[in-house]
Amino acid sequence: MAELGLNEHHQNEVINYMRFARSKRGLRLKTVDSCFQDLKESRLVEETFTIDEVSEVLNGLQAVVHSEVESELINTAYTNVLLLRQLFAQAEKWYLKLQTDISELENRELLEQVAEFEKAEITSSNKKPIIDLTKPKLVPLNEGGTAELLNKEILRLQEENEKLKSRLKTVEIQATNALDEKSKLERALQDLQLDQGNQKDFIKAQDLSDLENTVAALKSEFQKTLNDKTENQKSLEENLAITKHDLLRVQEKLSLAEKELEKKFQQTAAYRNMKEILTKKNDQIKDLRKRLEKYEPED
């Protein structure tokens, strides 16, 4: 049996679409045949016709056949768009971006290969027993497999990543507030010391001892508060560092999961075929450029 370079599942999908297209084509051909038959039965009732009568008959037949063929071509184009939409929707679920090469649609060699594939499929289907026509449907691509597990892991890591970002932002705000409060306390101590220096000359000797005791108590209280703030700041900075490490670790897991998914896609036959097509096209472009350089006028 002729092959298209696809795995068994995808080749079966191609066969199903070709059967659908073949049935639609057969119905439309029967419609065209009926147009000619209706013409024979309704208009060809006389033995002789004038040129004008023949022209009128042919023009009417042309309009009917043109309408039928145009309708079928439009419907075929819309059907192909719906088929592509299904493929692209499945690819987007796995964060893939598919590309198509429109020029390959007119590749005579590939078209002949598809024609041979269809002939072989028709011959093979005619030889199969009737029971084969009722075989169970294949499980859709998006209902299981390693790709689904990787996709779920990516979603989980993304959610965890967002949570860590939110936590990191909160810790950064707390650290900023602690630094601001520390700066305010330091400025207050400096102002207090400055006021103390300015007032020493005006304070009586008997009150100097009380004032120094008061200042010492204030210094002690301030130092205690400052130490508490410093410990709190250190704790916040440690939490910030831990959170950043967790974020980097999650981002690394996310990157590995995405690389694994990309690696599995690159191992598929579709990717290899696409890569081979791109290589052929690049070689053709290089050849055309060399040919053009031969015909370009020299300055």
Image (tube, rainbow, N blue to C red):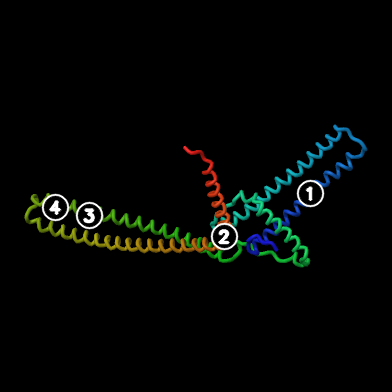
**Type of the residue with mark 3:** Glu
Real-space Cα separation, disc 1 to disc 3, in angstroms: 93 Å
Q: Secondary structure at mark 3?
A: helix
Whether label 1 touches label 2, CB < 8 Å? no
Find disc 3 in the rendering and name its residue.
186
Extreme-left residue of the structure: 205
Of marks 2 and 4, which one's residue comes earlier in the chain?
Answer: 4
Q: Amino acid at mark 2?
A: Arg
Q: What residue is rendered at 55% in x and 47% in y?
A: 288
Location of mark 2 (residue): 272
Crowding near the residue tagged with mark 4, few <14, some 14–19, many ≥20 C-alpha atoms within 10 Å: some
Image quarter (top left, top right, bottom left or bottom right) of the N terminus:
bottom right
Q: In this orientation, which residue lies closer to the viewer: 153 or 141?
A: 141
User: Vertically, is 238 above or below 38?
Assistant: below
Q: Earlier in the sequence, mark 4 or mark 3?
A: 3
Q: Is residue 268 left or right of residue 239?
A: right
Q: CA distance from mark 4 to mark 1?
A: 108 Å
136 with respect to 167 (left or right): right
Please tell me which of labels 2 and 3 falls first in the chain: 3
| Residue hosting label 4 | 196
Q: Residue at x 38, y 57 (%)?
A: 170
From the top left corner, tell me how far across and down residue 253 is, in percent. 45, 64
Quick one: SS at disc 1? helix
Task: Provide residue 276's location: percent of width, then percent of height.
Answer: 57, 57
The count of marks equals 4
Question: Looking at the picture, which amino acid does disc 4 mark?
Answer: Gln
Q: CA distance from mark 2 to mark 4?
A: 82 Å
Please state which of the two labelled residues, at mark 1 or mark 3, is closer to the viewer. 1
Which residue lies at the image location 78% right of the left edge and 63% below the top edge? 126
The first of marks 1 and 2 along the sequence is 1
User: Looking at the picture, how far across and down is residue 197, in whole percent?
Assistant: 12, 52
